[in-house]
Image (cartoon, helix red, strand yellow):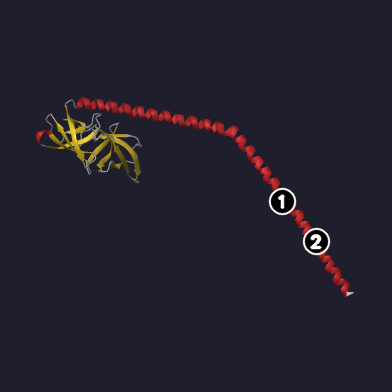
Amino acid sequence: MRDFEKKFILIYLFVILIFLTNFNKALASEYEKGYIFFLNFQNISKNVLQKLKNSLFFTQEDSYREKYYNLLKQLAQIKIAEQEKLFLKSLELIKERYPNVAEAKQISSQFGIIYAHSQKEVKINSIVIDENWMLVGFVRKILKSGYLEIISLNYPNIQFNVNNLDGINVGLAKTTGVGYIEVNFVDPKLKIKVGDLLMTGGDEIFPKGFLIGEIFKIENLGNTQKLYVTPLADFNSSKLIIVQ
């Protein structure tokens, strides 16, 4: 009897094991089919939504974006035109203020010092500009036979005041000798941006109103700003103008 019970129990367990194995396979197969169906449904839904989004929303968004960029471009052109107008006005005022100029021919330049020759008599500390009336520097020495020693904006540690084109004081400029000018102690509340033009503000070195250069970088330092300016003068021009 005991042997029969043992055999029955073994057969029963074997049958249950076979059933569970087949059930798990069937369940796994059905689960896999359902999961694949869900993935396909999700993919189709995603494609449909993307097409609807492209046809309805993105078309409008791209249209609005294009209109926005065109508006920005127009505003930028207006700002540039206003700046050019201010510059031309200030340039005319400078030319009227300094009618007596002398031409000088550049001989050589090195380390921010330009040597030039002029047929006319020139005074020490006279302002030197290029043909476009962009500030080059000032005459430091008068040499023999009409030769001049000119300190340019490429010479380091020249400090002078600078204004914007509206005549508002911006800060204290300092030449670096490495191709750009720093402007320190700029009020952070002052509305100024990259691309703005700066001119001399008037001091013992440079009189007021001569165009210096263009801002290419603005560094915020908390309670002040520092500007980095590219000089616009042609320091290699063979023809220089001495303003007296």
Crowding at dot 1, Cα within 10 Å, few <14 / some 14-19 / many 20+, comes out as few
* The residue positioned farthest toward the right in the image shown: 1
Residue at x 26%, y 28% (from the top left corner): 90
The tag on residue 18 is: 2
**Quadrant of the rendered image containing residue 172:** top left
For the image, the number of numbered tags is: 2
Answer yes or no: is residue 124 visible.
Answer: no
Q: Position of residue 34 (x, y in %)?
A: 72, 48
Residue at x 42%, y 30% (from the top left corner): 73
What type is the residue that disc 1 sits on?
Glu
Secondary structure of residue under mark 2: helix
Q: Position of residue 117 (x, y in %)?
A: 15, 33
Q: Position of residue 35 (x, y in %)?
A: 70, 49
Q: Nearer the viewer, residue 216 or 160?
A: 216
Q: Position of residue 180 (x, y in %)?
A: 28, 41
Where's the C terminus, which quadrant? top left
* The residue positioned farthest toward the bottom in the image shown: 2
Residue under pointer 1: 32
Residue at x 77%, y 59% (from the top left corner): 21
Q: Is residue 64 left or right of residue 220?
A: right
The tag on residue 156 is: none
Q: Is residue 85 left or right of residue 142?
A: right
Q: Nearer the viewer, residue 229 or 40?
A: 40
Q: CA distance from mark 1 to mark 2?
A: 21 Å
Answer yes or no: is residue 72 visible.
Answer: yes
